[in-house]
Amino acid sequence: MDVVLDTNPPALKALFVEGKLRIAPRDTQLAADWVMIHGLFEAGTAASPFKHRLTITLNGKNKTENVVCSGMPMGAKFVSVMNGGRLSLHAPPATAWSRLAADTTPGARQIIVADARGWQPGDTIVIAPRVAKRGQTEKRVLLAVNGSTLTLDKSLSFHHSGTMPVVDGRTLDMRSEVGRLDRRIVIQGDADSTNLKFGGHVMIMAGGSAQVDGVELRRMGQFNKLGRYPFHWHLLGDAPGQYLRNSSVHSSFQRGVVIHGTRQTLVENNVVFDTPGHNYSIEDSTATDNLLHNNLALENRVISLTEATLREQGDNQAANFWIRSARNTFTGNVAAGSMANGFWYDQVTDGPTVFRGNTAHSGYALSILTDFVRDAGLLVTNVGEHRLEFSDSLFYQNVNGIWPNENGAMNFKNIAFADHWRGPAMTMDTVGENTVFEDNLFVGKTREPVKGEVNSTDSQSVPPAMLIQYSGLADVRNPVFANYGDSSLLSANDILLEWQAQFFLSGVRLIGTAPGGRSFHEQTLTTLLDTSYGQPPGTYVFNKHPQLAPADSQAVILGEDGETYLRMPERFGYSLLRTEVLGGDYFSQSWHQPGFQALRSDGMRFTDGENDQFIDGFCVICGGRYRYALEQAPPTATFFVRLDDMGPHMPAGIAQSVIFSIPLDAAPKSVARIDELNDETIPAPPAARLTAAPSMAAFSATPHASYFYDPAARRLHLQADARWLVISR
């Protein structure tokens, strides 16, 4: 049937649309426990928007109810579109969110915004914070709208920014965002939703289609229930032409906008505010080729969930944008005031990604995991084999600006960092990876802090611009470090071994940064590729680590405190030699103990004094110039050796291997190479078995394919690389 709804019907148990249901041009109230759309539900079109008010209220208190439609369990309190159904909701054009056009101060009753088209008295707005401190997002009602000047129902309590500082010719848009929450078309949970944390949910499913523009979703989402979110594309596959635009989600009970198993949707110009968990979610690796453009995510709340699948999706480390598939496009979005992360690429396995023109600011670390967590404006974890590039974006006033983490290669290009007074602009622990930073701007301060703005005992201090943890190589090309005063620029923090962090620097420019701020950190290796950092090219090592430097290194004095560094004129890299016993765990059962000794071929002797897994952070590789003689044999019949993936930090062209020897009473039964090591017996694959060389000269000619046992010296000579050597005796 083709029906025009031109009245307010009584509250319905269910509304099932199999034909066409159009809302007449009048203010309309529609209430139902659930709405299933297999035909067309329409209130306005893109060409002819709905100019009146429509409120759809979803009723229901029974959290265990599970309505099944077309064989699909839908739960309760829903609008669902499937099996050829189409949802078309279009309100008249209006600005979804804007930015302040001038600074505000506490006590102000008026604000000026850049664009307030379509805003009206009675609308509710939210104003983003300008600092990384909880509770400074402000919600107000408009009493009057005079062009771009808005009169508020009550005065502001905090400072908000309306200026765009210019640093080194680059304009940083640090104006606080202003989101409008009200829309003419509303889908909402009933009044009991808040107490029950059980709102409505909109779900677009296989065969369904949604074109939604200018809709408000409030009191939506169902706490701790999988798949019950305010707006949710669910396993549609390809969905070209579908969109959610110019809409708002607020006061929800679980997340905001979710894309799951769906491709080619458009999410544009929306405002999502005050959600438990992630504001916007790309839920799995099959949600690809979607475009998220110019959306505002404002505040979220970290939550602890008990539903098994939800527990694995990181809402206790909530992100404004949570991303499980890199192969999507993110342009012009703003992540503001997150309790944990702004943008979080969480164990993505695909690529490439388009991440350009985005902003994350005022995020603070309040994750509720009991173990160590990482929070940042942009957190990238485990990106796999794809090199992801992030460009032309702005990060400011977060607890950490960006945090490349764990495995995966990444490029960060033409990004601006500013005012990270609580943590570094960049924290990195991409173990064993070369992360490239190119043409980036690091600003220590754009302005002096206002008293009470930051949650810090010393708001005048500026953290280092770049911090490396747990090993990693930062290839930093053409950076600008501005307004750091005499603060340190480079730092490291490694709980395993010092100096595993390494910086390569070239094309550096310093603005408003004193010479004292240029000192290298004692826990880093710093390689200068030119003179732009104020010192001759070469690799600099703090003198407390002499084993890292060859005998021909030059001692130099750097920094205000007169620290001594060893400078190697050549490019430099290293890796770590790791051994494991059969069935061992290298964090607890490695065969060498503290005090284990090795002798380098230049005569330097050293011990594993800091750690019982590695040879004092060892195997420095400088063009293969050193060999190592280990001075203890493992106690087991089978053991394993390789160069640790915490290195290798070797520049291109330098061999990523090392020749070493180890004392053995007799020739080994076999030596082989394997790719992976498990905690169980691993038979050496015949194809990977090495041959016994008849002499040291023969071994030196083919070290990768052979080994040499010297019966006179009772020493086994081997070449280690990134694959495991399996030695059985």
Image (cartoon, rainbow, N blue to C red):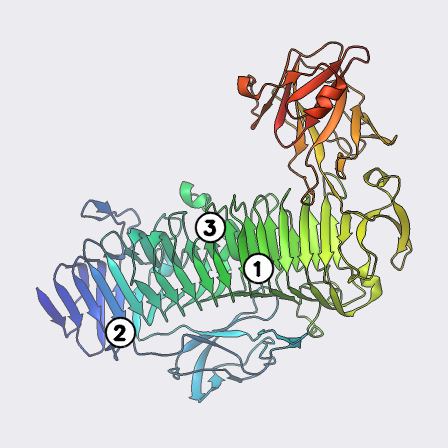
* Front tag of 1 and 2: 2
Q: Residues within 10 Å of mark 1 (few under 14, many from 20)?
A: many
Q: Earlier in the sequence, mark 1 or mark 3?
A: 3
Residue at left 19%, top 53%? 83
The percent coordinates of residue 490 (x first, y second) are: 75, 56
Residue 72 appears in the picture as rendered:
yes
Query: What whole-number distance in Å separates the C-alpha atoms at marks 1 and 3?
Result: 20 Å
* Front tag of 3 and 2: 3
The part of the image, by quadrant, that contains residue 599 is: top right
Mark carried by residue 377:
1
Residues at discs 3 and 2 in contact (Cβ within 8 Å)? no
Query: What whole-number distance in Å separates the C-alpha atoms at marks 3 and 2?
Result: 33 Å
* Front tag of 1 and 3: 3
Residue 376 appears in the picture as rendered:
no
Side of 453 relative to 108 (left or right) = right
Q: Secondary structure at mark 1?
A: loop
**Which residue type does callout 2 highlight?**
Ala
Q: Which residue lies under the disc numbered 3?
A: 351
Side of 707 relative to 710 (left or right) = left
Q: Secondary structure at mark 3?
A: loop
Which of the image's four quarters has the N terminus?
bottom left
Q: Residues within 10 Å of mark 2 (few under 14, many from 20)?
A: some
**Which residue type does callout 3 highlight?**
Gly
The percent coordinates of residue 22 (x first, y second) are: 16, 70
| Relative vertical location of residue 187 with respect to residue 152 in this rendering, above or below | above
Question: Closest to the observer: 277 or 715?
Answer: 715
Q: Which residue lies under the disc numbered 2?
A: 46
Question: Closest to the observer: 530 or 641?
Answer: 530
**Which residue type does callout 1 highlight?**
Gly
Side of 384 relative to 597 (left or right) = left
Q: Earlier in the sequence, mark 3 or mark 2?
A: 2
The part of the image, by quadrant, that contains residue 413 is: bottom right
